[in-house]
Image: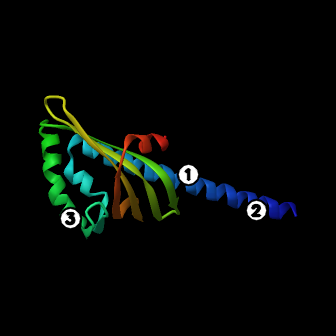
């Protein structure tokens, strides 16, 4: 009986370690995404998406390849890189499910820009994302921008 408890204890400990490692990797990926937005590093930003990733935009009622979204987003990255604007991206989660090579997350992201006159414009967006781990990298395979929300909902996710 003691051997069975020992084996079960080791299995639970190993599973907790894998879960913590996966969560750390996902958190690190989001931090790197935020840094790429802040620095206007478009190449780095798009490297976090699988080449065949899909954008689901329930706000507009459309779906399309992520590369189409990149075409619209790239000028903002270029303006950030040139110092014309400052950009920031923060993420908070309501739900996260994952194993060692797949993940599904739901939450809110807050993206904002500040122009040279100090005018701040931003949006709180409910989102969900699907991820797959390829080698050592986590790649988003689907981003679903579900709806616009507000700071009150954002604050509930602290």
Mark in front: 2 vs 3: 3
Residue at label 3?
67
Mark 3 residue element:
helix
- Drawn side of residue 68 relative to residue 23, left or right: left
Q: Are marks 1 and 2 in contact (CB under 8 Å)?
A: no
Residue plotted at (60% across, 53% down): 17
> Label 1: how many residues lie within 10 Å, few (<14), some (14-19) or many (20+)?
few
Between the residue at mark 3 and the residue at mark 1, the CA separation in whole angstroms equals 32 Å
Q: How is the image coloured?
A: rainbow
**Residue 139: where, in percent of width, then height?**
35, 61
Q: Nearer the viewer, mark 3 or mark 1?
A: 3
Residue ID for mark 1 = 20
Q: Earlier in the sequence, mark 1 or mark 2?
A: 2
| Residue 42 drawn above or below residue 52 | above
Q: Residue at x 50, y 56 (%)?
A: 96
Whether residue 6 is visible:
yes
Q: Earlier in the sequence, mark 3 or mark 1?
A: 1
Residues tagged 2 and 3 counted as in contact (Cβ below 8 A): no
């Amino acid at each position: 009986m003691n051997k069975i408890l020992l084996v079960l204890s080791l299995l639970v400990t190993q599973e907790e370690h894998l879960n913590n490692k996966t969560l750390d990797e996902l958190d690190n990926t989001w931090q790197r995404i935020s840094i790429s937005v802040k620095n206007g590093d478009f190449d780095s930003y798009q490297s976090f998406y699988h080449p065949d990733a899909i954008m689901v935009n329930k706000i507009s009622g459309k779906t399309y390849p992520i590369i189409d979204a990149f075409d619209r987003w790239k000028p903002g990255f270029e303006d950030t890189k040139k110092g014309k604007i400052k950009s920031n991206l923060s993420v908070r989660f309501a739900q996260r499910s994952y194993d060692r090579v797949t993940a599904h997350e739901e939450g809110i992201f807050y993206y904002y820009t500040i122009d040279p006159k100090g005018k701040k414009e931003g949006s709180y967006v409910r989102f969900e994302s699907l991820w797959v781990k390829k080698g050592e990298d986590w790649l988003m395979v689907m981003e679903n921008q579900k709806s616009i929300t507000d700071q009150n909902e954002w604050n509930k996710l602290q």
